[in-house]
Image (cartoon, rainbow, N blue to C red):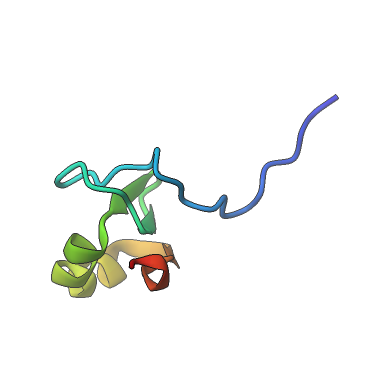
Amino acid sequence: MMTELAADPTLTAIDRCDRCGAQAYLRVFLRSGGELLFCAHHARAHREKLVEVASRIQDETHKVR
């Protein structure tokens, strides 16, 4: 029996920014395949470029306290 995974599983405290290691709030699905995770700070800093290379972006930055 196979378990179906959620299309965009919620990011948790275990998910870390690929740039600095802080908690990730943004998942970028790349057109070339794979994905990158970013904290809210680096998501804002690199937003323009990320939009260019992404097939889809899961943005949970609204959760930042």
Residue 5, quarter of the rendered image: top right
**Picture residue at 30% right of the left edge, 71% below the top:** 51
Which residue is outermost to the right? 1
Residue 39: percent from left, percent from top:
26, 56
**Picture residue at 26% right of the left edge, 65% below the top:** 50
Looking at the image, residue 37 lies above or below residue 63: above
**Picture residue at 43% right of the left edge, 65% below the top:** 60
Quarter of the picture containing the N terminus is top right
Looking at the image, residue 26 lies above or below residue 21: below
Front residue of 39/18: it is 39
Residue 14: percent from left, percent from top:
40, 38
Count of numbered badges drawn on the protein: 0
Residue 40, quarter of the rendered image: bottom left
Judge left or right: residue 21 versus residue 35.
Answer: left
Residue 31: percent from left, percent from top:
38, 56
Looking at the image, residue 27 lies above or below residue 13: below
Residue 35: percent from left, percent from top:
37, 47
Judge left or right: residue 42 versus residue 64.
Answer: left
**Picture residue at 32% right of the left edge, 48% below the top:** 36
Front residue of 28/61: it is 61
Quarter of the picture containing the C terminus is bottom left
Front residue of 48/65: it is 65
